[in-house]
Every structure is written in C-alpha cells, then in structure tokens.
Amino acid sequence: MKTAILITASAASLLFAAGSLKAADAPANPNVDEAKGIIKQFAGQLQSELKASLDNGGPMKAVTVCEKRAPAIAAGLSKSTGWDVKRTSLKVRNTELDTPDAWEKAVLEKFESRKAAGEDVKTMAFAEVVETANGKEFRFMKAIPTQQACLTCHGTEIPEEVATALDEHYPEDQARGFSLGDIRGAFSLSKPL
Ligand code: HEC
C-alpha cells in the first residue's frame, strides 16, 4: 500500500492523503527535511561553480562544468548521505544519467499540471513511500524552475558555439526551448526505509 504525501511550502504543511491529520497537526517529516538539506547542498554547489565558470571562462567553459561537475556532485552526495541523488526532467540532456523512471515521469507530469493550476514552481515538491522489490523506499522530488541564467544553454536562442558544443556532447539533447519560469526538471532523491 502506498502512502502519498503532498508537499507544499514547508514540512509543517504536509497533507497526509491517507491519514486523518489536518495540515496544521502534521508532524515534520525528518526524511523530507533531510532530502531538502541535500538538495540545498547540491543546488548551492552547482550554482556557485556554474556562476564562477560563466564569469571566468564563458558559456563554453560552463558546458564542461555542467557536464563533469553535475554528475560528480550528485555521485559525491549519494556516497556521503546514503540517499540516491540525481536530477531528471521530461526533456533530458544527459539521457544516460537523467532519464526519468516511471515514478519520476508521473511526478514530473503532475508538477506540470500543478503549475498549470497556478502553483509556485519554486516550492513545488512531492514525497511518497513506495514498495519496491527490495522493500520500502522513501522518494522525494523537488521542481527546478528555469531562471534567466539557464537560458544560454536551455533556452530558445542558444548561442551558436554553445549549441555546437552541446550537439557534440549530447547528440540526443532534448533540454532546449525552455522559457523563464518553466519547470526545467527536478531533483530526485530516494533511500531505503
Ligand atoms: C553552460 C551551459 C548550462 C547552463 C548555463 C545551465 N545548464 Fe543545465 N545542463 C547543462 C548540461 C551540459 C547538462 C548535462 C549535465 C548532466 O547533468 O549530466 C545540464 C543538465 C541539467 C539538468 C539535468 C537534467 C538533464 O536534462 O539532463 C537540469 C535539471 C538542469 N541542467 C537545469 C539547469 C538550470 C535550472 C540552470 C540554470 C540555473 C541550468 N541548467 C543552466 C548545461 C547548462
């Protein structure tokens, strides 16, 4: 049996879909707090390295930083925290590492309908306990909004030299054509319970 937890702005506003608790009475979920902490580290480290490389070497240097550092930071955090840490999207660039599984795809599709219904992408998240062949897993996803700085490599007018570099490294790249405020993808974390 699945226990679905819909998450809005903070852990205090958890809605227990299957339980009788009202949002205000819901206890903070330590797994959600832990996952959010890991995402903060991932996003913080990646953004500072991305910004530094854009400032110092320009977008071509930054492509290499994204290519090498994003998977490395995710792998490092997976190792140090015991969670499986990744990013995913409905339109992926790194098809090898970031292609969504069925659960992630369903959550990303729900994120799109939640956005269409007016919800703020910045705080959009979802958590669920799922049964797997190896027992229960806690899974958590947090949406990633498209910001101005992302458009150089994910937007509709990608500079030609950047597009060429992306073509070379990611021949199956789908992660282009995004606009400001779109859901670029999501962080996806899981751990065995
Ligand atoms: C300099 C180019 C560049 C910029 C700027 C950039 N990205 Fe990326 N992005 C990449 C590359 C290259 C990858 C593939 C790296 C990987 O994760 O393996 C990627 C992958 C991703 C992924 C993982 C899913 C996928 O498609 O493989 C997400 C999510 C993402 N980027 C979000 C963002 C966001 C949000 C911003 C702005 C804050 C941003 N990117 C800015 C180049 C860039």
Image (spheres, helix red, strand yellow):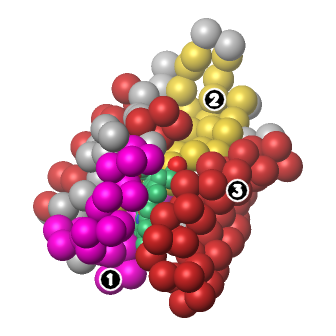
Quick one: label 3 or label 1, which is nearer the N terminus?
A: 3
Q: Is residue 133 left or right of residue 58?
A: right
Report how far apart the C-alphas of labels 2 and 3 lie in the structure: 22 Å
Which residue type carries mark 2?
Glu
The label on residue 137 is 2
Which residue type carries mark 3?
Ile
Q: Give the structural element (helix, strand or loop) at label 2.
A: strand
Percent from the top left, x then y, of residue 176? 25, 58
Percent from the top left, x then y, of residue 140? 54, 46
Q: Nearer the viewer, residue 104 or 149?
A: 149
Confirm or reject: label 3 Cβ below 8 Å from ligand 1: no
Q: Would you name the residue on which mark 1 appears?
A: 148
The image quarter containing residue 123 is bottom left
**Residue range of the region highlighted in magenta in the rendering:** 142-170
Q: Would you name the residue on which mark 3 appears?
A: 73
Q: Is residue 163 magenta?
A: yes
The label nearer to you, 2 versus 3, is 3
- Badge 3 density bin: few <14, some 14–19, many ≥20, Cα 10 Å: some
The label on residue 173 is none
Q: Is residue 134 magenta?
A: no
- Badge 1 density bin: few <14, some 14–19, many ≥20, Cα 10 Å: few
Percent from the top left, x then y, of residue 78? 74, 44
Q: Nearer the viewer, residue 6 or 111?
A: 111
Q: Is residue 79 left or right of residue 25?
A: right
Above or below for 19 versus 62: above
Q: Nearer the viewer, residue 119 or 49?
A: 49
Q: Quadrant of ligand 1?
A: bottom left
Confirm or reject: label 2 Cβ below 8 Å from ligand 1: no
Tag 2 near tag 3, CB within 8 Å: no
Residue at the extreme right: 80
